[in-house]
Image (tube, rainbow, N blue to C red):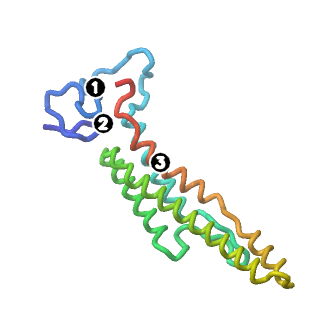
Amino acid sequence: MRKCPFCAEEIREEAIICKHCKSDLSGKDDLSPGKLVGSPTVPDLRKIIGLSGAVILFVGVFCPIISMPIMGSMNYFQNGKADGVIVIIAAAMAGLLCLAGKYRWLLLPGIGSAVTTAITYYNFSSKMSEAKERFNSELFNNFFKGLADAAFQSVQFQWGWAILILGAALIIAAGLMKGQAGR
C-alpha cells in the first residue's frame, strides 16, 4: 500500500488511478484538450485555496473589527473572550488539514469559524441596539441625550469582518471542492 500524492489516501501499489480522488497516477503528462501543460491540478488548487483561507483567517483575527471613540479600534483577539482564540485554533487546524491532504475535514474548522464569527457579530449588534434603546429611554428629555446619540453613531464595524468571512469561505470552498475536475 502507498499514499496517493494528490489526496494522501491509501491506495494499492499497482494503482493507475486513485480510487478516492480519481487522479491519474501513471506519471504521463495529460495533454488532453482543455488542460494546460504545467497547470496546477485540482488537488493542488484545493491546497492553495485551503492554505490561503487559513492564513487569511489567522490574519483576520488581528484586523480591526470595531472602532469606538476613546477606545480606538478593537480586533477579534482583544475582545476579552475565547472567540478570537477559537478562530486562531480553527485557522491552525485548517492549515494542518490542508498540509495532510484531508480536505473534507476542512468543513469543520471552516464552518466552525464562520459560525463563531457570525455569533460574535450578532451578539455585538444586539448589545449595541439594546444599549442604544436603554440610553434613549433613560435620557429622554435630557441634555446629554445628544451626546449619547453621537457616541453610539461613532461606533463602527470595521473591515476585519470581511477578512474573517473571506478566510472562512475559502476554507469551506476548499473542503467542498471535488478531487478531480470532470470526474
Which of the two labelled residues, at mark 1 and mark 3, occupies the earlier sequence position? 1
> Mark 3 or mark 2, which is nearer the start of the sequence?
2
Distance of mark 1 from mark 3, alpha carbons?
25 Å
Give percent across and percent down for residue 3. 21, 39
Residue hosting label 3: 52
Give the answer, above or below, for where 168 lies relative to 125: above
**Residue bearing the label numbered 1:** 24
The amino acid on which the numbered mark 2 sits, given as a three-letter code, is Phe
Mark drawn on residue 6: 2
Q: Residue at x 49, y 74 (%)?
A: 81
Q: Which mark is residue 48?
A: none
Q: 117 left or right of 72?
A: left
Residue at position x 47%, y 48% in the image: 52
Q: Looking at the image, which is closer to me, 37 or 62?
A: 62
Q: Residues within 10 Å of mark 3 (few under 14, many from 20)?
A: many
Relative vertical location of residue 164 with respect to residue 49 in this rendering, above or below: below
Q: Is residue 6 above or below residue 156?
A: above
In the picture, measured across the screen, residue 174 lies left or right of residue 126, that is left
Q: CA distance from mark 2 to mark 3?
A: 18 Å
Toward which corner of the image does residue 4 lie, by quadrant?
A: top left
Q: Quadrant of the N terminus?
A: top left
Return the disc, 1 or 2, that comes first in the chain's sequence: 2
Q: Quadrant of residue 87?
A: bottom left
**Crowdedness of circle 2 by 10 Å Cα count: few (<14), some, many (20+)?**
many
Q: CA distance from mark 1 to mark 2?
A: 9 Å
Amino acid tagged 1 = Asp
Residue 100: x percent and y percent?
A: 30, 48
Q: Which residue is at 76% across, 77% downward?
A: 136
Please state which of residues 30 and 43 is positioned toward the viewer in this rendering: 43
Is label 1 in a helix, a strand or a loop?
loop
